Amino acid sequence: MGNNDIPINISDLFEQVGSGPSVSFSEMVEQKKLELGITDFQMSKILGIPKNTFYRMTKRISEGDVESLDYFSIIKISQLFNLDVQDLTKTYVGSLNSEHIGQIEDARKANYILRTFDVKGLKDLNFISSTTDFQHIENRIKSFFHLDSIFDYSHEVGRVLFSKLHNSNDKMRELWVRSAFFQFEKIENTNEFNREVLLSLVKNIRPYTRYEEKGFLTVIRALFGVGITVIVQPSPPKAKVRGGTFVVNGRPCIAITDYNNNYATLWFALMHELFHVLNDLDQLKVLKYALTEDGAADLFLLQEEDADWFAREMLFPREFMNYIKHLINSPTSVAKYAEEKRVHPAIIYSFFCYEANKEMGKNLYGLYQQYFGKTDTALRSLKTNPFGKESIFEEISLIKKRLTVETN
């Protein structure tokens, strides 16, 4: 870097602060005067600063007075003494008192928070109570993830996820992904994953859709037993995330949202992600994770249409629909057929609307919405809201108990 280059490496500045300046600002000025063989008067004329004023200014700077020198003067001094602007700035910063150094550190932390987090989004989540109190925001994030420093967030929370493959501009989505990954890491499922056992289990999931209170929980526990950890957490604000499949410590993990508070969608999302576990695991080991979002194109060319088809066929095959669609306006007939096929009626209505929309361009969701069912009962024992807790470890502890211990 030449002495005309202005950008400052803030990390280098704080290195200087930590070690302290080898010489003070005023000592450096005296050394350079001797090297150049100039007098105080000559130097003050060159810099355009009265001699007595410059003397008092350098003395006050060495005593930590930050208001005694503007940045324009730093540039002029650097040119006069043929110094790198960054080196001169480091000497200047190193001469400051602890109070002013603390203010610079506070600004550095605030900059990191603004670059890394959606502060307004955090407020909307009720995760923080103020968007301007950065000390509060810093402390909240640190205590939530048990971090020693706010800067640890980038490499301790989902540290392996965000490479060039996943360059996201959506800070809330990134927080959602990092939080899910962090939970999977700490839950630490030690059960071995076996694809053949999973395939056998998946074929038997449909009947559990009929048990609104414990069916989903039972399936999630069974999946945990075969090495797949499943959590449910709210979709990130403004996003339409249905779910995501992760690979953590070599094992598949799934995060499901309560998207649209739709009971049928809950099961569909789970089966969709299970398809990815069965068929895209090698690719996911490279990607680390992939999200399923409503209306979003798949950037990594996972088999999204095949995953939808799989979820559909596992829950309610097309041949079943071909029979019941003619009786769809008879709730009694639908309920009876659902019982016969061992599936929840909500799934029949949801798939009927899906087909009508996809194949005929008819939006019938509003007409049959009353039959879709809500997720509240199914998720009473499973739904997580880590951002409502003081610490994410509270949520992790609850999840581990739910997945491994029978609850009444």
Image: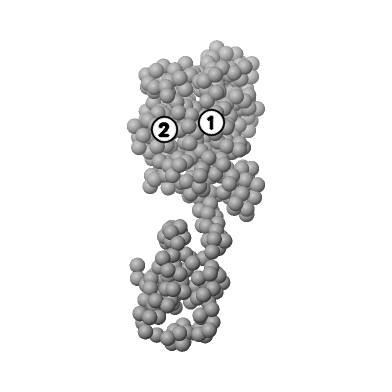
Q: Amino acid at mark 1?
A: Ile
Percent of width and height locating residue 371: 63, 25
**For numbered disc 2, what is the local secondary structure?**
strand
Percent of width and height locating residue 393: 54, 33
In this view, the mark in front (1 or 2): 1
**Could you tell me which residue is drawn at 35 percent across and 37 percent down?**
286
**The quadrant where residue 233 appears:** top right
**Could you tell me which residue is drawn at 41 percent across and 65 percent down?**
22
**Could you tell me which residue is drawn at 54 percent across and 78 percent down?**
56
Q: Earlier in the sequence, mark 1 or mark 2?
A: 2
**For numbered disc 1, what is the local secondary structure?**
helix
**Circle on res. 396:** 1
Q: Quadrant of the N terminus?
A: bottom left
Residue situated in front as seen by the camera: 95 or 227: 95
Contact, mark 1 vs mark 2 (Cβ under 8 Å): no
**Could you tell me which residue is drawn at 64 percent across and 50 percent down?**
130
| 301 on left or right of 104 | left
Residue situated in front as seen by the camera: 29 or 168: 29
Residue highlighted by disc 2: 248
